Image (cartoon, rainbow, N blue to C red):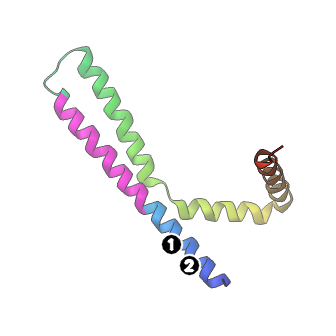
Amino acid sequence: MNKQTTSNMGRDAADFVNDAGASAADAIENVTDRASQAVSSVSGGVANVASKAKAQFDSAADYVREFDFNAMIEDAKQYAKANPVPVLLGALAIGFLAGRSMRHD
């Protein structure tokens, strides 16, 4: 596998994550809209709680929609280039812990 193929696979994975995020955001909005319609006939405390829940779910949908996986990967690359020693030490620590957890004694 060459560098170009690996790069294309990474780009495809990032596009898939971004598309999945948009679909998830749409699904969250759809559910909250339906719940809001169902609760619209109710009054009092239940309607107040439902309204607050809808606002929270709308906020979550917006966050998922605005999440840019490609930007996050680019930020991680920039950090790794600027701080190679802490990144390598972190990778070693994660590898060590993963190895220890998979070890069968």
10 Å crowding of disc 1: few (<14), some (14-19), many (20+): few
The image quadrant where one finds the N terminus is: bottom right
Residue 23 included in the magenta stretch of the image:
yes
Mark 1 residue type = Asp
> Is 102 situated left or right of 30 in this image?
right
Mark 2 residue type = Asn
Residue 65 included in the magenta stretch of the image:
no
Q: Residue at x 52, y 66 (%)?
A: 14
> Is 77 situated left or right of 65 in this image?
right
The image quadrant where one finds the C terminus is: top right
- Residue found at the far left of this picture: 41
Please say if 37 is above or below 7: above
User: What residue span does the magenta drawing correspond to?
Assistant: 19-38
Residue under label 2: 8
Query: x, y percentage for residue 2?
Result: 67, 85
Please say if 24 is above or below 48: below
Q: Main secondary structure of the magenta part?
A: helix
Query: x, y percentage for residue 41?
Result: 13, 24
Disc 1 and disc 2: Cα gap in Å? 6 Å
Q: Which mark is residue 12?
A: 1
- Residue found at the far front of this picture: 105
Q: Residue at x 23, y 34 (%)?
A: 35
Please say if 84 is above or below 66: below
